[in-house]
Amino acid sequence: MPIQLKSGPEIDAMRVAGRLASEVLDFIGPHIRPGVTTGELDRLCHDFMVNVQGTIPAPLNYCPPGYKPYPKSICTSINHQVCHGVPGDRVLKSSDIVNIDITVIKDGFHGDTSRMFLVGEASIAAKRLCEITHEAMWAGIRQVAPGKRLGDIGAAIQKLAESAGYSVVREFCGHGIGRGFHEEPQVLHYGKAGTGLELKTGMTFTIEPMINAGRPEIRELADGWTIVTKDHSLSAQWEHTVLVTEAGFEVLTISEGSPDRERRRPS
Ligand code: MF3
Ligand code: CO
Ligand code: CO
């Protein structure tokens, strides 16, 4: 399917879905403490989405070609887990870092966002990785404007991550989003400035860099979903859903509790 440019009512619906996804992260934050299991976080988020928000958790039973249906409502990726960590009996402990990735569907439209959380006392190295990855996502977002190209986003992210001594995961990327969870285009988190698809007002896509403290290679666990770093180095990820506007960008996945409230539009 070609890239769908959103307008008027579709943008309003994307704003609602984006805010709701971010509000799930606001809700779950205080529960992310030593002793809690990732399965409990999943259950809490599922109940909040379905019973409080009236949203559909998009991951539940999500089944792209070549995969088995995803069994849970959120993704919880801990330490050397890169993405798509499946919630279960694992107990979080102090010094863990965990990415919580939320995708909701409201009135047929998707909002997709993730943040890193530090469990208890985190090491300086873990904090630095989370902060640099957050800045890398923002370096990508700041490139977004009509006339810019996808390669501008990837190049900005790659430069920031690699200057810090980290590496960019290649196998997973950001994606167009709307009525579909994963639409065209693919938004790579590495690349060459001035190359690739030209951005147009009304495009909506995610930017969600996965940054490894060590080497970029990954492998998939036997559960068919969880992705880990091959060298067991720590990995971090942040994600926003973004709209291309005349002024540049609007970050759709913002809520009261979002750390990025003030940066939603270009300053
Ligand atoms: N939310 C993830 C993304 O950012 C996709 C998760 S697919 C799932 O694209 F099935 F693992 F939930
Ligand atoms: Co996404
Ligand atoms: Co996501």
Image (cartoon, rainbow, N blue to C red):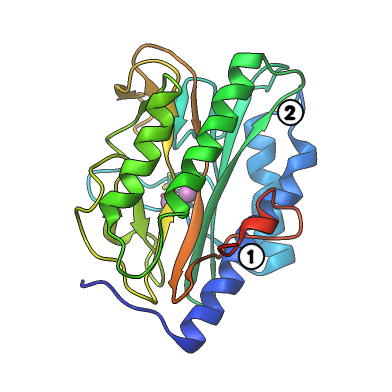
Can I make out residue 227 in this image?
Answer: no
Q: Secondary structure at mark 1?
A: helix
User: Viewer-proximal residue, 99 or 62?
Assistant: 99
* Residue plotted at (30% across, 68% down): 147
- What is the spatial separation of the Cα atoms under label 2 and label 1, in whole angstroms? 26 Å
Quarter residue 48 falls in: bottom right
Circle 2 Cα neighbour tier, 10 Å, few/some/many (<14 / 14–19 / ≥20): some
* Residue plotted at (29% across, 43% down): 67
* Residue plotted at (52% across, 42% down): 238
Q: Assign the C terminus to one quadrant of the image.
A: bottom right
Q: Is residue 26 above or below residue 199?
A: above
| Residue 139, position as x, y percentages in the image | 46, 45
Q: Assign the N terminus to one quadrant of the image.
A: bottom left
Foreground disc of the pair 2, 1: 1
Residue type at mark 1? Arg
Residue to which mark 1 is pinned: 19
Residue to which mark 2 is pinned: 36
* Residue plotted at (21% across, 73% down): 2
Residue type at mark 2? Val
Quarter residue 15 falls in: bottom right
| Residue 155, position as x, y percentages in the image | 31, 42
Q: Is residue 201 above or below residue 149?
A: below
Left or right: residue 160 versus residue 128 is left
| Residue 96, position as x, y percentages in the image | 64, 20
